Amino acid sequence: MPQPTRHIVFALYPGFVGLDLAGPLDVFSCAVRLAERQGRPVPYRCHFVARTTGPVVSSSGLSVLADTLPDAFDATVAGSDAPAPHTLVVPGGVTPGREGDDPDLRAMVAGLAARARRVVSVCTGALLLASCGLLDGRRATTHWQACARLATAYPAVRVEPDAIFVRDGEVVTSAGVTAGIDLALHLVEEDLGPATAMEVARLLVVYRRRVGNLSQFSAPLRAQARAGARFGPLHVWMEARLGEELGVERLAGQAHMSPRHFARVFPQETGMSPARYVEQLRLDRARELLESGESHMQTVAAAAGFGSEERLRRAFQRRMGVTPSQYLEHFSG
């Protein structure tokens, strides 16, 4: 039996980030074009909703014509033929956090969310959802620069700062800007199957579809930034010796510190114990190898310093929730 058209509602407001809208919009639109080309029912219809109809100016100056008012999805106002919003998409804004200060905007988002089957935010749109109470008690993410703000302003939200997107029930939040494309591809896969999602990604020339628990930015750059100036040289030294024994005493000696002082200061500077930091470097190396197409797990384990496939597998499952083989599948489709 053909599936009914899903109504995708984009909630717009002045200063929204254009790519937060355009990325997911093109994913859904591409899925529509594929269906039309293959003679299948149209899977999506997209609506641009704002408090008043007319042009809504994004943070970059791009104007989008809001053609629909929120009442169009309210059967008590529009009548029994009002379409039911399937997915509400809330883009981020150029002044993250301040959008939630607008009570009319909060009321619009909360009202649409109450009628939608799925509620989605892109980038700092998560702060707007949080201001409506929609993330209370839920896991969520946002742009890495705004994660601390989200956690501080809304302590009822369980923030996961190192994720591309996070799903908790029917609420899905994504990281910054282009992560909205990954999130939308995930939703297309959920609605229409993995083959359609992969074809959409191919047509959009997306290099690869990232799974939700991938890091928001380059793992080596993230690790170097974490090491800071004090332990930057040690970080470089460690990366060149991942296959060697890297215990506290050896690391402390390389850093010209006593083991006791090193074990106390290193976590303060990096946010990780020395052992966890070493494991993260090895995990990052293994991920790079898998992403480049290396499929022999013993080779990956040896090159990354894990020594055995079993240690590699345990580290992946503990830190990423998937096995190395499952991770590899996302880069070989």
Image (cartoon, rainbow, N blue to C red):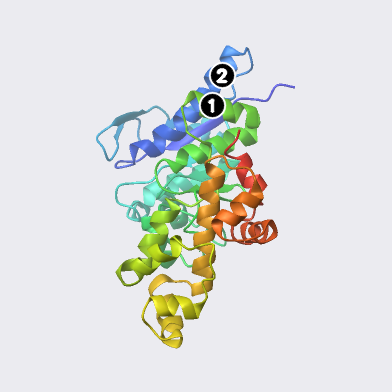
Q: x and y percent of residue 308 in the render?
A: 67, 59
Q: CA distance from mark 1 to mark 2?
A: 8 Å
Q: Earlier in the sequence, mark 1 or mark 2?
A: 2
Q: x and y percent of residue 281 in the render?
A: 49, 61
Which image quarter is the N terminus in?
Answer: top right
Q: x and y percent of residue 8 in the render?
A: 52, 32
Residue type pointed to by label 2: Leu
Q: Using a 10 Å C-alpha cutoff, classify the residue at mark 1 as few (fewer than 14 neighbours), some (14 to 19) or many (20 or more).
A: many
Q: Residue at x 52, y 29 (%)?
A: 201
CB-based contact (under 8 Å), mark 1 and mark 2: yes
121 on left or right of 298: left
Q: Is residue 10 above or below residue 303?
A: above
Mark 1, secondary structure of its residue: helix
Question: Which label is found at residue 200?
Answer: 1
Quadrant hosting residue 127: bottom left
Q: Is residue 41 above or below residue 176?
A: above
Question: Which label is found at residue 155?
Answer: none
Of residues 54 and 152, which is closer to you in this image? 152
Of residues 162 and 14, which is closer to you in this image? 162
| Residue 81 appearing in the image | no
4 on left or right of 146: right
Q: Which residue is mark 2?
A: 34
Q: x and y percent of residue 317 in the render?
A: 65, 58
Quadrant hosting residue 55: top left
Q: Is residue 216 above or below residue 17?
A: below
